[in-house]
């Protein structure tokens, strides 16, 4: 958002909330501009509109309250629909778990974590899968959906930084695991 767009948001708030009178309008605009600079004006304006329509207390919102009202990417799949997709994938996962995992929607892949889970579940008794495993999957799916919704509220640049840091941490972890595996191989050879 630009400074002029933030001014418009502040102006709407002062007209809508008669008791909202920032002590220093310049400092308020500067602060809000710094906080909201990576958000789109249309999203913040829609969030303010939503806030005003649902507000019953009569107090102007904070930047965080507006960010929280920004519409986030909708996940069209219910928990049971996601489980249905996993359940269908299980029928072919004894020998083709990787292929079945790759076909799953990204949010379901994140819930499962790795393709070997499909292979493990495919080898279990059906009663266990349809009760305990299903229940655990649904709980984890809710958690992943909530995490994705929260992540989508972050400014794009911050998400990119976090994803790059996560990729670097994964790379470091892989390097450490490879070195530990090499050390174990060396130790095993020296014991022979």
Image (cartoon, rainbow, N blue to C red):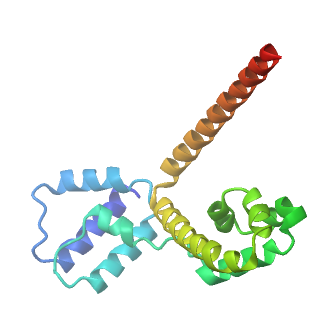
> x and y percent of residue 36 in the render?
37, 57
Asked if residue 167 is positioned above or below residue 19 in the image, the reply reads above
Asked if residue 44 is positioned above or below residue 169 in the image, the reply reads below
> x and y percent of residue 79 in the render?
59, 79
| Viewer can see residue 78 | no
> x and y percent of residue 83 in the render?
67, 78
Asked if residue 192 is positioned above or below residue 37 in the image, the reply reads above
Q: Quadrant of residue 145?
A: bottom right
Q: Residue at x 34, y 60 (%)?
A: 4
Which of 77/92 is in front?
A: 92
Q: Residue at x 68, y 32 (%)?
A: 177
Q: Quadrant of residue 90?
A: bottom right
Q: Is residue 64 left or right of residue 91?
A: left
| Viewer can see residue 80 | yes
Which residue, as the protein is rendered here, is positioned at the far right?
95
Q: Residue at x 64, y 72 (%)?
A: 133
Asked if residue 174 is positioned above or below residue 69 in the image, the reply reads above
Count of marks, rendered view: 0
Q: Quadrant of the C terminus?
A: top right
Q: Quadrant of the N terminus?
A: bottom left
Which residue, as the protein is rendered here, is positioned at the far front?
192
> x and y percent of residue 136 in the render?
58, 70
Which of 77/132 is in front?
A: 132
């Amino acid at each position: 958002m630009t400074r002029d767009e933030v001014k418009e948001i502040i102006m709407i708030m002062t007209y809508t909330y008669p008791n909202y009178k920032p002590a220093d309008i310049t400092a308020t605009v500067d602060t809000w501009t710094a906080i909201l600079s990576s958000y789109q004006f249309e999203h913040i304006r829609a969030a303010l509109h939503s806030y005003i329509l649902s507000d019953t207390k009569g107090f102007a919102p904070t930047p965080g309250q507006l960010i929280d009202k920004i519409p986030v990417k909708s996940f069209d799949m219910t928990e049971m629909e996601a489980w249905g997709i996993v359940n269908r994938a299980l029928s072919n996962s004894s020998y083709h778990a990787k292929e079945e995992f790759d076909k799953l929607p990204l949010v379901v892949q994140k819930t499962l974590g790795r393709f070997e889970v499909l292979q493990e579940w495919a080898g279990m008794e059906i009663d266990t899968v349809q009760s305990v495993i299903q229940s655990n999957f649904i709980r984890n799916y809710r958690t992943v959906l909530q995490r994705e919704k929260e992540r989508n509220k972050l400014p794009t640049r911050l998400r990119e930084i976090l994803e790059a840091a996560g990729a670097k941490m994964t790379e470091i972890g892989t390097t450490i695991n490879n070195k530990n595996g090499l050390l174990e191989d060396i130790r095993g050879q020296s014991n022979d």
